[in-house]
Image: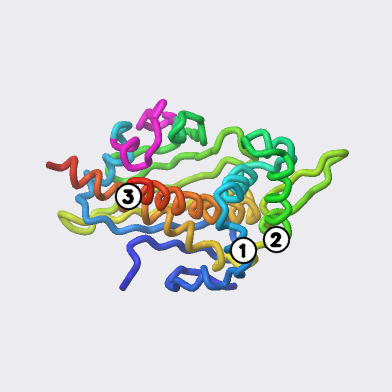
Amino acid sequence: MELKTKIIAVEAKQEIQITRLFGLPLVLLFRAYAEAELVEQWMGTKVLKLESKKHGAYQFETKDANGNILLQSSGVIHDYEPNQKITRTFEMENTSFPVQLEFLEFEKLSENSSKLTMKVVYKSVADRDEILKLPFAYGINMAHNKLEEIASKLK
Amino acid sequence: MRIYSQSNNCVIMNLRRDVFQALADPTRRAIITLVALQAMTPSAIAANFDSSRQTISKHIQILTECEILEQEQQGREIYYQLNPNGMKEIADFIEPFRQMWDERFNKLEAVMKKSKK
C-alpha cells in the first residue's frame, strides 16, 4: 500500500520534503492551517496568536495533562496566498534548535482531494538530523503514554 | 548520494535489544524527553523527578551504557545529551518522524471532515 505521508530526506542536505494526500477539498485543507480553532484541534496545541496574512506571526503553546508547558513554538509568516501557499519560519522557543524555514504548498487534485507539499530548510545538515531524531524520543513516550492511558481505563 | 524514503517497517528491528530494555522504563523515557531538547546536568535532570538523586543517576548510567545518552564535560559540570551517533543513518530514525506527521495529518483530515458537516 502506498503511504499517504511521505518524507524525502537526502543525505547531507539541510532540507526535507513532506508530502501528504488528503481526502479533503482544497479549501478545507487550507482552513485547517489558517484558522486558530482548527489548528488547535488537529495540532493538539493552544494557539496564542495566529495572524494568517503576509507579514503576520504565530505563537503556539503545548502543555501536558498537569498544565506544565512542554513546548512553545512561534514564527513569522513571510508569504500567504489563500488556498495556494504559506511561507513561514518555525522556531521552538527556549531550545537550542535554530529557526527553520517552511514552504507550504496546497494543491487541488479533485473536488474532494488535495495535496500538501511542505519543504523545510534547516540551518545546517546537523540541525536537520537532530530535529529528525526528536520524534524517536517523543514517539516512544507518546506511544507508551497512550498505552498507559488505555490500560488505565480498562482497570 | 543516497535518498531515503520510508517504505519499510524494519527500522525498529535495527535497534539493539538493550536499547529496548533501556526504553522500557517510564522514568528513562522521561529523561530522554528532557535531554532531547537540551543538554542537562544530572542534578538538573533529577530536579524533574520525585525519585532520589541516586535512582536518577542509575537511570542515566543505563541510558549512557546503551549509547542513547552521551556525556560532555563543560568546566566542572558533566552534561548529558542525546547521542547523535546512537542512530547513524537517516533511515534509522526517519520513520518515527514520518509517523508523527502521518498521525498529525490523519487528525487534520478527521477534524476537517467533521467540521464540514
Could you tell whether A50 is left or right of B17 in the image? left
Q: Earlier in the sequence, mark 1 or mark 2?
A: 1
Could you tell whether A112 is left or right of B16 in the image? left
Could you tell whether B26 is left or right of B82 in the image? left
Q: Amino acid at mark 2?
A: Glu
Which residue in the protein does label 2 denote?
B67
User: Which is nearer the eye, B12 or B65?
Assistant: B65
**Element type at mark 1:** helix
Is A124 above or below relative to A8?
A: above
Quadrant containing the N terminus of chain B is: bottom right
Q: Residue furthest right?
A: B76
Q: Which residues are magenta?
A: A38-58
Which residue in the protein does label 1 denote?
B19
**Element type at mark 2:** loop
Q: Quadrant of residue A115?
A: bottom left
Mark 1 vs 2: CB contact within 8 A: yes
Q: Position of residue A141 (x, y in %)?
A: 50, 50
User: Which is nearer the eye, B12 or B23?
Assistant: B23
Circle number at residue A154: 3
* Chain letter for mark 3: A
* Chain letter for mark 1: B
How far apart, in angstroms, are the residues tagged by discs 1 and 2?
A: 8 Å
**Element type at mark 3:** helix
Mark 3 vs mark 1: give the one in front: 3
